[in-house]
């Protein structure tokens, strides 16, 4: 099961004419990279001789990066703090040609940053700096207003929920209502909180663990998976339910009890970081180019296979995805 290469090339060519908004929890992925050669005399902990610092777009910003790398015009909507890290983030967004004009600055919370300290590609510890309390009503107003400003100019909205406080029930309900009124594709990548608040969207994309946890049911086999997924499908009332299964690929559910199973296209799984972001971004963009959820999922599955062969949260592009499609067709 794959996609015709001529149709794929047509989609890639048309992608630059699409406009996608990403609403969600914005983060910075910070990597402190060095070598460990001795133990501290102060405590039984390793001493890292720091060599480099890297800052990358994380969370919803990484989803926006994936969209931008696939040539579509990208708007990012979210909240950052009034701090040095927000300046780092804005510079990264500017470098990647991502519109940051709709990001709201909240001086009551920091910019979320996750610092990973690594030696010889092995993570020693991660330090998170964040506030996860819900945003204030004033910030809610700004977020909803900013989305309203662009809704008539976009083809799709991706909601990326990491449960960091941005996506309150009011924000979720308001933006979904606004998007529906304007016939916009709505894709959601949920987490534990708010899971059942995203009713009636176009695409709802939990992973296997999120499906099991939120439905409060253990999944031990294919029969369990399909039964529980159908229960969620009826409850969430999405047009499509996409369940990602890690190295086992993904399942797509649509009305009339149609189920499509796609195996992973990864040749070698080096790092699964960011694969979920790649799936939701590529699938949503592809869905604006074709009316087929199956074609969109196939393209997204190839994209996920590509990024799983890279280290860290690295996006992919049309050329790399095309190579994967060609390899599979051979």
Image (cartoon, rainbow, N blue to C red):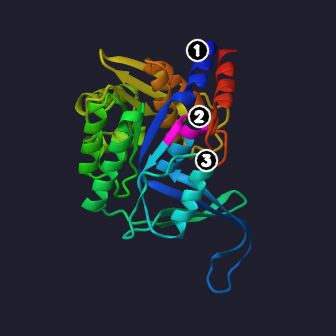
Q: Nearer the viewer, residue 99 or 330?
A: 99
Q: Position of residue 103 (x, y in %)?
A: 43, 54
144 vs 314, left or right, is left
Sequence-first disc among 1 and 3: 1
Which mark is first along the chain, 2 or 3?
2
> Could you tell me which residue is drawn at 56 percent across and 44 percent down?
65
Pointer 3 residue: 96
Circle 2: element type: loop
Q: Residue at x 63, y 51 (%)?
A: 95
List the residue tagged with mark 1: 7
Q: Residue at x 30, y 42 (%)?
A: 175
Q: Quadrant of residue 240?
A: top left
- Decide which of 98, 228 is in the foreground and name it: 98
- Residue at 46% x, 47% y is 76
| Position of the N terminus by quadrant | top right
Q: How many marks?
A: 3
- What range of the chain is rendered magenta? 67-74
Q: Is residue 216 visible?
A: no
Q: Which residue is mark 2?
A: 70
The residue lying toward the viewer, choosing from 51 and 83, is 83
Q: Is residue 174 left or right of residue 23?
A: left
Q: CA distance from mark 2 to mark 1?
A: 16 Å
Determine if residue 36 is in view: yes
Quarter occupied by the C terminus = top right
Q: Is residue 79 above or below residue 326?
A: below
How much space separates mark 1 and mark 3, taking CA atoms? 27 Å
Q: What kind of element bears circle 3?
A: loop
Residue 159 % position (x, y): 39, 42
- Report x, y in % for residue 249: 52, 30
Disc nearer the start of the sequence (2/1): 1
């Amino acid at each position: 099961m794959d996609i015709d290469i001529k149709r794929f090339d047509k989609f890639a060519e048309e992608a630059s004419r699409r406009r996608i908004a990403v609403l969600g929890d914005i983060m910075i992925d910070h990597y402190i990279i060095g070598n460990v050669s001795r133990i501290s005399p102060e405590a039984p902990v390793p001493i890292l001789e720091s060599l480099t610092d890297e800052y990358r777009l994380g969370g919803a910003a990484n989803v926006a990066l994936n969209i931008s790398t696939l040539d579509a015009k990208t708007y990012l909507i979210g909240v950052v703090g009034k701090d040095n890290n927000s300046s780092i983030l804005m510079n990264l967004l500017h470098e990647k040609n991502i519109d940051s004009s709709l990001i709201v600055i909240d001086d009551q919370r920091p910019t979320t940053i996750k610092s990973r300290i690594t030696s010889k590609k092995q993570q020693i510890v991660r330090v998170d700096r964040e506030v996860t309390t819900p945003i204030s009503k004033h910030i809610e107003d700004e977020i909803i207003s900013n989305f309203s400003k662009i809704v008539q100019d976009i083809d799709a909205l991706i909601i990326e929920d990491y449960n960091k406080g941005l996506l309150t029930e009011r924000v979720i309900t308001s933006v979904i209502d606004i998007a529906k009124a304007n016939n916009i594709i709505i894709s959601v990548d949920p987490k534990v909180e708010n899971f059942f608040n995203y009713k009636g969207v176009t695409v709802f994309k939990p992973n296997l663990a999120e499906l099991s946890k939120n439905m409060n049911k253990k999944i031990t086999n294919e029969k369990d998976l399909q039964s529980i997924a159908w229960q969620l499908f009826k409850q969430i009332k999405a047009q499509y339910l996409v369940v990602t299964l890690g190295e086992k690929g993904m399942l797509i559910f649509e009305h009339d009890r149609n189920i499509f199973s796609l195996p992973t296209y990864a040749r070698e799984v080096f790092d699964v970081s960011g694969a979920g972001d790649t799936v939701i971004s590529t699938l949503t963009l592809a869905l604006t180019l074709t009316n087929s959820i199956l074609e969109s999922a196939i393209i997204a599955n190839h994209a996920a296979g590509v990024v799983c062969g890279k280290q860290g949260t690295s996006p992919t592009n049309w050329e790399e995805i095309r190579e994967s499609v060609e390899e599979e067709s051979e």
